[in-house]
Amino acid sequence: MSSPALTPRRGWVIQKFGGTSVGKFPDKIADDVVKVWNESNRVAVVCSARSSHTKTEGTTSRLLASADVVLDADDDNQYLHFLEKITIDHVENAMEMIQSKKIQAKLIEDTHHEIEEARKLLYASQIIGEVSPKTLDCIMSCGEKLSCLFMAALLNDRGIPAEYVDLSNVVTKDFGTVLDATFYRSLASRLHEIISAIDSSKVPVVTGYFGTIPGGLLNGVGRGYTDLCAALVAVGVDADELQIWKEVDGIFTADPRKVTDARLLQSVTPEEASELTYYGSEVIHPFTMEQVIKARIPIRIKNVENPAGEGTIIYPQNVGRKGEATPPHPPTAVERLPSSIYNKIKTATAVTAKSDIVVVNIHSNKKTLSHGFLAHIFSTLDKYRLVVDLISTSEVYVSMALYVTKTDRKLLRSTVEELKRFGEVEVTHDMAIVSLVGIHMKQLIGIAGAMFKTLADERINIEMISQGANEINISCVINKNDTVKALNAIHSKIITDPFKSNLAIELTSKVSELRLDQY
Ligand SMILES: Nc1ncnc2c1ncn2[C@@H]1O[C@H](COP(=O)(O)OP(=O)(O)O)[C@@H](O)[C@H]1O
Ligand SMILES: N[C@@H](CC(=O)OP(=O)(O)O)C(=O)O
């Protein structure tokens, strides 16, 4: 299969591969993706740290775990066990995947070297008695170095000339001290210099870790920084396309692993992609969107196991670039309807769910006025770095949906204890947020009611409701055990075939065509 030449001038295509893809399908990445696309375009590869099975057991997670235990007085060598697992995993992978003995030996030597560097940092942290954000970033960077050393070796081993690019020290003080537009512009410009300097016959294999940025990469960007790195590389070289390669065919109308009749979306808007990512669909890091959309670079989500698939494109609605424009945004209703009706139906684009949600209700003890009440609450949450996903408030009541993973449980207990100073606190665990997302929802009267009625018909209790200020997201909090049932019911009634609930006709008839046709 020859790759589509996006432009005759062999423009850049930046291909980002997540950790599980690098861990599970390195051969497909090399032979079915990079090699094919590099025939007609200039490809640069950006990789995350390898995860042989799942991200939680992946290299980055192991490195962060080693930093977690390095100060543990009970067992001051526990961190070495994590490094040992990483070493075995990567050396065995090198021996299995690299045929050339010379390339294999060099890769194994480099692997041991990078892990030794991480060990030195951990040992130094143990001696000093602390792991600073900068040190943590440097320890974490070992993962991307290992995976990109491997990917470059694999490409060379398979006859695809490649060059390893370590971005650990790409950030310099003259980029500024805050993560603002100036910082990202300077970084993108530096990336352009680095990538463009590489021999045009070689594929740059770039670490998704891009250095100790102001405030720290893990603190400032969080997990998923490779998406952002790939975006900045794309902006830097003015790429024709940024491709995010995953293990699903693109963005679906729901999680295809939970909703069997979920359908692939041809395109979504950046706003929809951000909402879907934030509320559970793990599509792409929101910071990434901002960078490439401003540069009007389309983002395509594709599947490593199905590279011939079209994937899903994320692009400002119908904002053409270099002549092409995004395909019209699908209304997503079932296509088998007569086109005269199908093209008029507008409904939500997708439904998504986010787990690990805890609802915290606070009834003010009225010792402070409402603005002080809210200020105290938010400063307490900020102190313990807990993320508020949804909030609804009145003068004396605040209900919040907090994202609390197992590792945050201790922080939650401390937060609740402190919040009790401002009123009575109730905590409900094991909840989930279900969100209906769609650019058309701005014009659809009744869609919120249809969503909540669908849940009521399934006897699913709603703990909390919230509509995003951008009007393209309606969310509610339910018991996590009802998540799959809720996703399937909403998907069936509102997205797959709104006709079933007579929703489409009612919704379309209620909203003026003029407003509807904005998108
Ligand atoms: N609307 C959606 N469209 C596509 N995938 C979704 C959606 N909602 C949730 N998902 C889930 O997101 C996950 C994407 O994971 P994966 O393909 O492994 O990405 P990565 O390689 O970046 O980690 C899949 O498990 C998929 O089931
Ligand atoms: N390797 C890092 C960064 C990352 O972006 O991973 P992924 O692309 O697999 O989400 C992590 O595990 O968080």
Image (tube, helix red, strand yellow):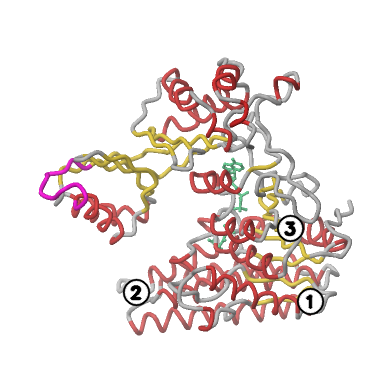
In the image, taking residue 188 as reference, residue 104 lies left or right, namely: right
Residue 504 part of the magenta-drawn span? no
Label 1 neighbourhood size at 10 Å, few (<14), some (14-19), many (20+)?
few
Give the labeled residue for mark 1.
101
The alpha-carbon separation of the residues under discs 2 and 3 comes to 44 Å
Mark 1: which amino acid? Lys
The mark found on residue 473 in the picture is none
**457 up-or-down from 153: above or below:** above
What range of the chain is rendered magenta? 362-372
**Mark 3, residues whose alpha carbon is within 10 Å: few (<14), some, or many (≥20)?**
many
Up/down of 318 relative to 238, above or below: above
User: Which image quarter: residue 207?
Assistant: bottom right
Q: Position of residue 251 (x, y in %)?
A: 64, 42
Q: Residue under circle 3?
A: 241
Q: Secondary structure at mark 2?
A: loop
x and y percentages locating residue 273 in the rendered image: 58, 46
Q: Residue at x 76, y 68 (%)?
A: 154
Numbered disc in front, either 2 or 3: 3
Left or right, 13 with respect to 359, comes to right
- Which residue does the numbered mark 2 point to in the structure image? 71
Specify the amino acid type for callout 3: Glu
The picture places residue 386, in percent across and down from the top left corner, at 34, 55
Left or right, residue 513 beside residue 37: left
- In primary-sequence order, the first of circles 1 and 2 is 2
Mark whose residue sits in front, 1 or 2: 2
Q: Secondary structure at mark 3?
A: strand
* Residue visible at 74% across and 67% down in the picture: 44
**Label 1, label 3: how far apart the Cα atoms are:** 35 Å
Task: Give me the residue at 43% from left, 66% from top.
Answer: 219
Is residue 74 or residue 386 the one in the foreground? 386
